[in-house]
Amino acid sequence: MAPLLEVRSLEVAFFTKDGVVRAVNGISYALDQGDTLGLVGESGCGKSVSVLAMLRLLPEPPARIMGGQVLLEGRDLLQLPAAQRHEVRGSQVAMIFQDPMTSLNPVMTIGDQIAEAVAVNLGAKPREARERTIEVLSAVGIPNAEERLKDYPHQFSGGMRQRVMIAMAVSCRPKLLIADEPTTSLDVTIQAQIVDLVKRLQAELNMAVIWITHDLGVVARIAKRITVMYAGYIVEMAPIKRLFAHPQHPYTIGLLGSVPRMDTCGDQELQYVDGFPPDMIRLPQGCPFAPRCAYRTEQCTAERPELVQVAQDHRAACWNNEAVKSQKNAAPQLERA
Amino acid sequence: MPEQEILLQVQNLKKYYPIKRGLIQRTAGYVKAVDDVSFDLYRGEALGLVGESGCGKTTTARVILQLQRPTAGAVCFQGRDLVALKGEELRHMRTQMQIIFQNPYSSLNPRMTVGRMLMEPMAVHGIAKGKEAEERAAHLLQMVGLNPYFVNRFPSEFSGGQRQRIGIARALCLNPSFVICDEPISSLDVSIQSQIVNLLKRLQRELKLTYLFISHDLRMVRYISDRMAVMYLGKVIELGGGNRVCNYPLHPYTQALWSAVPIPDPVVEEGRERIVLEGDVPSPANPPTGCRFNTRCPKVMDVCRKVEPEFRELEPGHWVACHLY
């Protein structure tokens, strides 16, 4: 079966007065229907830019898509004319954002906002749109949905606002939902509610989900596969259990080691990744992670490693795979299966 | 808990903010941001203060430092009640207590060089002047892992993690014995967070500091703290040794909070049973009667809606406010 979404060598750059920011440098991945992909990385690694570029939501200029294809059921979204692109957004691919307060319209009732989306995308009549709105608001767990149609975003709490965003996103039954750090600004108990909600809706609607986050804990809870990004490159990609048990790339190992856990006694020293992320205008010539890497060799600073298969269904971009493997076994706290 | 010297004693601390209404600004009620909080802080320990946003963690910190005056209660630092101190006396005590702020972008003066930022407090408090102050500033920068040459630079020339290091250096420039870390890592990236936490831990060891570590990131608090206090709607509902509170939480809220924290391990996550709380935190202007958690508590009983539970020591050093016990 052909995948629902296939991203092929997507490249995005921003042309600024300081120079060309190479935000996304040729990333490829595929996603099946109903599947969940976790896109993990730190701020500025290109994870958000890559999905925004997919839907052509970036301001162009300064952004420019330098190359690549984004195939949704075989159609290249990047090549679609504006009118058809519009059709895809909302009805086939929907997105939820980190901050629901700034992504909802503050001067429009939530009933009108969702109904508008339904009317535009599905061509529903006002009454149908209203009914559908009540239905989705109840589905995302807003109590007294019918009465709350008349409320404005500021009358909802942070968690409830995120539910409204999700209601709007799923109102047209999209095939793909892109969640860009949807729980980052929420408290943990609310975060858990939202993760459960998205999981439930995903199963009900058979949606594929791309979940963007920097929190490896949240990803462990929701994703089936993980893609780790660094400086605009994919550095590692594997099914979730495999990645947590046998991380290959030093950056992934560093990230996993730098998150303390609640469930193990914690007097072990927290690992950390030295230094800070590179300047995206002046990316190093070799491996972008080389300046911070503990396993760096001469080859790393000279030549950039490609993403290659290291085990079945597991790819990593590192010159020192064998070295990483043996070192990893020596570090006790990473040794759990 | 072995016999230890008490450095700071917080007793029945309250901070109410009036809600003003109408033309003559009549007081229509109070937001009870901190409502009857008591705890001791031992010399050399790190006490973690956790809770969801709006539960009063930061207000507690500000009231302890007398950056805001409490509505009622006492804060005894080395035996002296800070609430009763004023002017010069309070200023003098301030050299002992410092704070590291959450946002390293807004808490550093953009028009001051790093050196001036570090040397000004030394001059004000007469700790060091001239050449000696310069040397001390350079030494501080080195201590927090920055290049001493950075003294002549402005905050805008640094990244978030580096700025937080400057914030830490500034907090340490007067040789305090007590430092409040108010969400020092929440605005930083994951790989930088662990750098800062490890730095804070090292400095605590080397300088024998006492920390009040405030964060909503339970994993980081767990990692750095010896003891932990959990707040909900202006009250401390559970307090105890870090391992005790984490492994055997007693209060239903603590249990729910812990189970909501994702564990970065898909195998564990799969088999984990979770308590998902319904609804949102009620407004602190109009908290529920009885136990404040009763509206969301999965184990709620009749008595919880009427009587406020007492904060009791259930086992040595492990305190909880709940009718279940």
Image: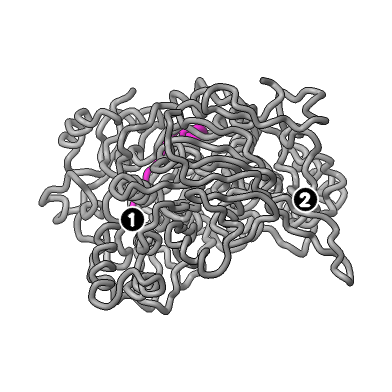
In magenta, the rendered stretch is A219-232
Q: Which residue is mark 2?
A: B285
Query: In the image, what residue occupies the spot 42% across and 67% down?
Result: A64
Across and down, in percent, residue A147 comes to 87, 46
Q: A295 or A57: which is nearer to us? A: A295
Q: Is residue A143 magenta?
A: no
Is there any visible trace of residue B312 in the rendered image? yes
A270 to B246, vertically: above or below: below
Check if mark 2's residue and mark 1's residue have beta carbons within 8 Å: no
Query: In the image, what residue occupies the spot 28% across and 63% down?
Result: B141
How many residues crowd around disc 2 within 10 Å: few (fewer than 14), some, or many (20 or more)?
A: some
Q: Is residue A313 left or right of residue B303?
A: left
Q: B141 or A119: which is nearer to us? A: B141
Helix, strand or loop at disc 2? loop
Query: In the image, what residue occupies the spot 10% across and 51% down?
Result: A298
What's the amino acid at mark 2? Ala
Query: In the image, what residue occupies the spot 38% across and 55% down?
Result: A45
Quadrant including the C terminus of chain B: top right
Where is residue B123, by image quadrant? bottom left
Q: Which residue is mark 1?
A: A231
- The chain letter for the residue carrying disc 2 is B
What's the amino acid at mark 1? Ala
B273 to A271, vertically: above or below: above
